[in-house]
Image (tube, rainbow, N blue to C red):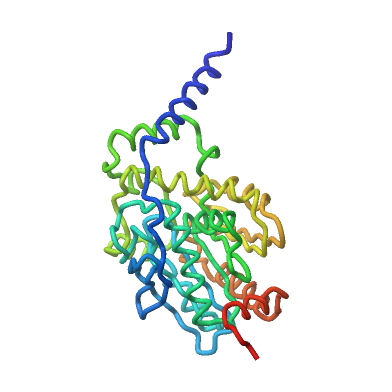
Amino acid sequence: MRPWSARRNSLLAALALALQGCVSFPAAAPASGQARLENDLFVARDGARLGLTVWRAKEPAAIIAAVHGMNDYAGAFSLAAPYWAERGITTYAYDQRGFGRSPNQGRWAGAPAMKEDLRAFIAAIRRDHPYTPLFVMGHSMGAAVVMAAHKDEALDADGIILAAPGVWGGAQMPLLYRATLNLAACVAPGKTLTGESAGRQASDNIDFLRAMYEDPNVVKDTRLDAVLGVVRMMGEGWDASDEIAGDFLVVYGARDDIIPVKKIRKAAKRLSGEVETRVYEDGWHLLLADTARAAPLADIATWALARADREPPRRAETLEQAVPNLP
């Protein structure tokens, strides 16, 4: 007879699997139009009008398409992007569906829609800047979205930056936690939780944390079904880490209190291609806003600009497709 611990885990696994289909999320909406950028809006292919913030460099040598984390919005890059702009990098950041200034704040939009929006966002920037090297950066949950989308089909980017990537989901999360979360989200999907209940610290920049708390664009109360959604999204990110290849820069703080550092380290090692990793001893989860943010911001700028100086063979082909009849 199997030990009780083995039987318990089998029962929990069966429960988690049985409840997984209890909570479902919207599929990607039919996308027949062309995404476009309009001042402070990113209009998605299905017509959804998502919040957009752009920090422009005077003479951009590179562009970063930035994807924020859970409950955040484009404001997450408000300290990083001006620094990059001074160094010749323009940053485009949009509010993902269900977050910030985009529709249905606080409601989980579903992974298919989030990945589709990312692809459309990249395509829209490419159309407006066909000759400028483009780098995609995801922070936390945003990194999971980037990784999962890249797994589905390689992103049209000259490099990918993963900042404190959210890879603590799926099989990487304790089985009891997954089963409990599935059950709770099934029974009371609209029940909300606050970050305070977790007792974790996201950054040592207290002024920035206070500003986030007062910012109406930052989600404060998280629905249980949204918690389940982000856990599943992070699980996709973890699974993708063993299957995606490319030119990667992974940055994270040794003091990250949100995503287990050992999970980030393992995910970085699973990536294929040209992978560089930077660990900051004084860095927290919001390392782009920490008091010691100077080092990661400089490393990201240096990495992107170094790659912008070289011309990957595939870029010429990409430009010909994006802008027909090039001279």
| Quadrant of the rendered image containing residue 106 | bottom left
Does 186 appear above or below 7? Answer: below
Q: Classify residue 180 as left or right of residue 308.
A: left
Q: Residue furthest bottom?
A: 327
Residue 49's spot in the image, x, y percent?
Answer: 33, 69
Q: Taking 102 as reference, is 129 above or below it? A: below
Q: Nearer the viewer, residue 145 or 278?
A: 145
Q: Position of residue 40 (x, y in %)?
A: 35, 77
Q: Is residue 259 above or below residue 246?
A: above
Q: Classify 282 as above or below 11.
A: below
- Residue 99 found in image quarter: bottom left
Task: Say which of 70 and 203 sits in front.
Answer: 70
Relative placement, left or right, of 319 versus 209 is right
Which of these two is toward me, 190 or 151? Answer: 151
Quadrant (top left, top right, bottom left, bottom right) of the N terminus: top right
Q: How many marks?
A: 0
* Image x and y of residue 145, in percent: 50, 56
Residue at 42% over, 29% down: 18
Residue 38 pos. (x, y %): 37, 79
Q: In this image, 49 relative to 86: left or right?
A: left
Looking at the rendered image, the quarter that the C terminus falls into is bottom right
